[in-house]
């Protein structure tokens, strides 16, 4: 049985572990069904043919900053993803990237990544496009739903050749698909309010918001319910896992 590869980039143990547990819980995955790699701890050599699909999580890294300002860890991770996409994109290999995964895939595919469309931490209304209503991950779901977001940068436009599946008023590119099996979301399909509260504490000095705003943001997200993005993650897992 081929496993699903879960790639993570969060340097903090607590946020990384919490994200991993959320991906398992929301995706309905057993530990025996996945292979977890924390890229910030070292770059491995992988063969995508050993896996049934890849899920890439978020990170505090900014894709859009000048190369010279990036840490060596970030440079190594971005080089890894570029090499990975050289296999994933031509082969239409099942991939789902969230937040940073969205930016990395978007940049590889030719989209400009900038701070033109940031979204503050919290929930936002996502609107499914006409093409999105036909996609297996979105078909039959509400045309408008709430999702958890929080990012300084995003795709300025849909990558060339990609299909826009979902959008929002503050951030036009919320979800896109490349070919038939390669997906990216700017929103976090795995996250709930507790997950975001943990991230608010972890990243309050990373420029997403003013540190003194942390408690106000926590109060605003507490109790937020975003079930539809979780359905999207569940559908991806159900489509590509091997039983």
Image (tube, helix red, strand yellow):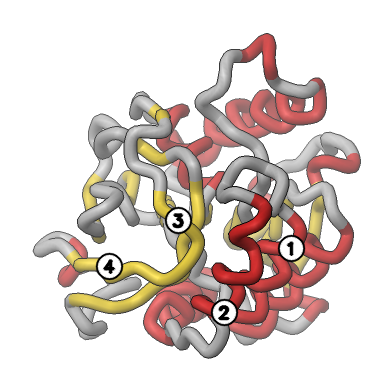
Left or right of 65 on screen, residue 131: left
| Residue annotated with mark 2 | 219
User: Which of the two labelled residues, at mark 2 and mark 3, occupies the earlier sequence position?
Assistant: 3
Q: Quadrant of residue 70?
A: top right
Q: Mark 2 or 3, which is nearer the eye?
A: 2
Q: Quadrant of residue 54?
A: bottom right
Helix, strand or loop under label 3: strand
Residue lying furthest front in this view?
A: 212
Residue lying furthest top in this view?
A: 68
**Labelled pair 1, 2 in contact (Cβ < 8 Å):** no
Around disc 4, counting alpha carbons within 10 Å, would you say few (fewer than 14), some (14 to 19), or many (20 or more)? many
Left or right of 154 on screen, residue 44: right
Q: Mark 1 or 2, which is nearer the eye?
A: 2
Examine the rendering and report whether any part of residue 241 can be seen.
no
| Residue annotated with mark 4 | 126
| Residue annotated with mark 3 | 120
The dot on residue 201 is 1
**Label 4 to label 1: alpha-carbon separation:** 25 Å
Q: Mark 3 or 4, which is nearer the eye?
A: 3
User: Which of the two labelled residues, at mark 1 and mark 2, occupies the earlier sequence position?
Assistant: 1
User: Which of the two labelled residues, at mark 4 and mark 2, occupies the earlier sequence position?
Assistant: 4
User: Which of the two labelled residues, at mark 3 and mark 1, occupies the earlier sequence position?
Assistant: 3
**Labelled pair 3, 4 in contact (Cβ < 8 Å):** no
Name which residue lies at 57% across and 70% down.
216
**Label 2 to label 3: alpha-carbon separation:** 14 Å
């Amino acid at each position: 049985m081929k496993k699903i590869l879960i790639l993570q980039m969060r340097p903090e143990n607590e946020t990384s572990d919490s994200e991993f547990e959320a991906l398992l819980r929301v995706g309905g995955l057993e530990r025996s069904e996945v292979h977890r790699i924390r890229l910030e701890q070292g770059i491995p050599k992988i063969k995508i043919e050993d896996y049934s699909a890849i899920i890439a999580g978020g990170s505090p890294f900014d894709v859009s900053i000048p190369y010279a300002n990036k840490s060596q860890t970030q440079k190594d991770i971005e080089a890894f993803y570029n090499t990975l996409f050289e296999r994933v994109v031509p082969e239409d290999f099942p991939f789902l990237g969230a937040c940073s995964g969205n930016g990395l895939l978007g940049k590889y595919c030719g989209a400009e990544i900038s701070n033109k469309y940031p979204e503050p931490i919290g929930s936002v209304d996502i609107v499914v496009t006409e093409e999105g209503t036909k996609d297996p991950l979105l078909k039959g779901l509400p045309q408008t739903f709430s999702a958890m977001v929080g990012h300084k940068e995003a795709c300025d436009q849909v990558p060339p050749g990609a299909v826009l599946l979902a959008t929002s008023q503050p951030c036009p590119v919320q979800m896109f698909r490349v070919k038939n099996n390669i997906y990216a979301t700017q929103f976090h399909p795995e996250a709930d309010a507790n997950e975001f509260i943990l991230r608010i504490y972890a990243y309050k000095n990373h420029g997403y918001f003013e540190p003194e705003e942390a408690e106000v943001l926590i109060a605003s997200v507490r109790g937020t319910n975003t079930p539809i993005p979780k359905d999207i993650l569940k559908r991806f897992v159900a489509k590509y896992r091997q039983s």
